[in-house]
Image (cartoon, rainbow, N blue to C red):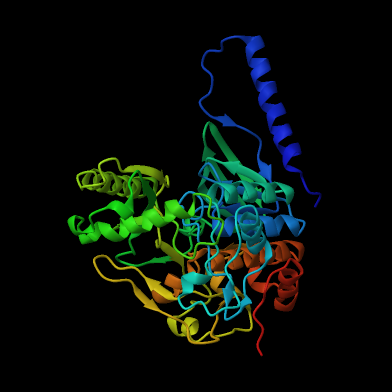
Amino acid sequence: MKKIKRRSAIKSIGAISLGMATSSSLRGEVSNLPRYKEDDRLITDILVVGGGTAGVVAAIQAGHSGCRTILVENGSQLGGTITTGGVVFPGLFHAWGRRIIGGPGWELARDAVDLEHGFPDFSRSPGRHWHHQVRVNGPLYAMLAEEKCLEAGVHIRYYETPTSVEFNNNRWTVEIQGKGVRKQIICNQIIDCTGNAAVTSLAGYNTLREAVTQPGSILFILGGYDYESLDLESIPDQYRNMLRHNWRILRGSSGDDDYQPFTPYSLLVVNGADSTTSESHTLANINGRTQVLETLRKLRTLPGCEKIKIVDMRPETAVRETYRIDGVYKISYSDYINGRIFGDSMSYSFYPIDLWREGQPIHQEYLEKDIIATVPLRALIPKGSTNLIVAGRCVSSDRLANSALRVQASCMGMGQTAGAAAALAFNKKTTPLNVPVDELKKMIEDHGGIVPRVS
């Protein structure tokens, strides 16, 4: 498929907008203008729903594989948890001295780092897993993701969400609604990267959810104080670490170009954070922002913190857990911690078991030396589905395995798998579950991906 340069795509969008404005000004005022503009159907080979961590990579891979690709995102930018959620540590790309995640996801992270700062030394033993985290600049990552999607020929549609999904005559019909727009998208393959398995559910397939989900986090940075001059004896314990950590962030961002191996944000836990519906997501965001405001007001009563201020805060509460698909295969805790390699393993995942629990310490379990978990193709496919594949945290897995699989680098690996599998399925007129495994592995590797191999 011929690549579309960013400037060409933007120029064509601008020409359309200018034409609309010109014709409207010539007509003058119009009464009874329809609320929604219902355009002709859009026809595409692959539809990716969700422009977060996995969806961006899936769309780029599908586009570079030669397929007409549409990416629908209900927000204003790409990147999801990395950008809107603000978790700018999208690890882990390396394990035990070698890189395990490649392809479009690694290229994005690498390019973002190259425009900002350096990498940690991956050849050294990390001590703690986060010492090998790759830090990126969120806004820069969003722009690069958009650029790479456009270069791959991906048609991006912001502010839109599916309202119905139907499969007939070996094609999907997806109704989407957005600002002033209702459309039908007709496609052969769907990649569900919503994080909530929303498309899978709309299509009528089973999804799974815990009775009580993990809490979310609201991310922010504080400034306006001098930590080194504070009388720490007068500061309650619950605020000391936050103030110290923010001070390190501020000092590290003021001309120090060295890689900072610590989390570049502070967070507050938001219990019950759920992004499944607009109502639950609204509540999660309100609860998160309320906590930050309460914390700010309390800190301003402490000596030396009278002028403390919010330097930055992410627009959304980052959510860890909602729905997962009921897949052809469910990755188990045992599979994960033992690094099981399947015949259809297509990507790696390396992160500790990381289960957050309301009012309790985080439950973490580290992988033993040289163990790396893998993700089989079957875990990305809902049971009984045709021409449908998922990527990201809604991967079919039990709760403990999912607590590690949900991190961004692992989701990028899944995204590349999904994009390649959908493209191969389209080209072979089959469904992702039935694509030749060896051909899929070769396609992933040809696009820079790293595929697990049985030794």
Q: Position of residue 169 (x, y in %)?
A: 66, 56
**Left or right: 455 with respect to 32?**
right
In the rendered view, tell whether residue 62 sits above or below residue 361.
above
The residue lying furthest to the front in this view is: 229
Q: Is residue 283 left or right of residue 335?
A: left
Total numbered labels placed on residues in the image: 0
Please name whichever residue, 12 or 23, is drawn nearer the observer in this view of the structure.
Answer: 12
Between residues 83 and 256, which one lies in front from this camera angle?
256
Q: Is residue 16 above or below residue 285?
A: above
Tell me where residue 49 appears, x and y as whole percent.
56, 52
Q: Place residue 449 in its image quadrant.
A: bottom right
Q: Quadrant of the C terminus?
A: bottom right
Name the outermost residue toward the right: 2
Instruction: Please state which of residues 66 and 45 is positioned toward the viewer in this rendering.
Output: 66
* Quadrant of the rendered image containing residue 357: bottom left
| Residue 104 coordinates in the image, percent (x, y) | 67, 61
Q: Is residue 384 visible?
A: no
Using the image as rendered, state which of residue 223 and residue 394 is in the foreground: 223
Q: Is residue 375 above or below residue 216?
A: below
Q: From the top left corner, tell me how far across and down residue 229 is, in percent.
A: 29, 52
For the point 47% across and 74% down, the residue is 129
Is 213 left or right of 193, judged from the image as shown? left
Q: Is residue 112 above or below residue 33?
A: below
For this orientation, the residue located farthest to the bottom is 455
Residue 34 in view here: yes
